[in-house]
Amino acid sequence: MTDGYVGNDMAIIGEIQKYKNARVFSFGIGGSVNRFLLDKMAEEGRGEVEYVALSDDGSAARRFHERVRSPLLTDISLDFGNLQVADVSRNELMTFSARNPSSFTDATPKPEAARFD
């Protein structure tokens, strides 16, 4: 836990990058949080970030608990087989949760040839 004024943001993010199988969920409480650090921690840790106002009624803690307790799908990968894909924007997919669904698009020369099961 930190107030966000740590000064070594990149070192912290570098430590998170070492643990590829871990999930990092970051919380920012109040109006003066280090959004860069919290956003990057969640991004690199394949988790999510939550910003909580000082007036929060406890709903942020309930949302967090629900997200980590019951992910819908985790560690998703796509196999394009022989399909020539023109553009892939991420090489790692996030976890699907009820609160934060993900979507992806393809840019194939022949979209009718694409099939995802």
Image: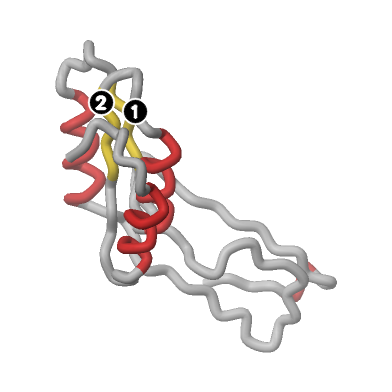
Are the residues tagged 2 and 1 within 8 Å (C-beta)?
A: yes
Relative vertical location of residue 61 with respect to residue 26 in this rendering, above or below:
above
Residue shown at 75%/80% (left/top)?
84
Q: Is residue 70 left or right of residue 42?
A: left
The quarter holding residue 99 reads: top left
Total marks placed = 2
The residue beneath circle 2 is: 29
- Which numbered disc, 2 or 1, marks the residue closer to the eye? 1
Q: Amino acid at mark 1?
A: Val
Instruction: Please provide percent x and percent y for residue 30.
Output: 28, 20
Relative vertical location of residue 81 with respect to residue 53 in this rendering, above or below:
below
10 Å crowding of disc 1: few (<14), some (14-19), many (20+): some
Residue shown at 32%/61% (left/top)?
16
Residue extending farthest bottom: 82
Secondary element under disc 1, as helix, strand or loop, is loop
Secondary element under disc 2, as helix, strand or loop, is strand
In this rendered view, identify the residue nearer to me: 93 or 18.
18
The residue beneath circle 1 is: 33
The quarter holding residue 61 reads: top left
Q: CA distance from mark 2 to mark 1?
A: 7 Å
Residue extending farthest front: 7
Q: Which mark is drawn over residue 53?
A: none
Q: Amino acid at mark 2?
A: Ile
Res 49 seen here: yes
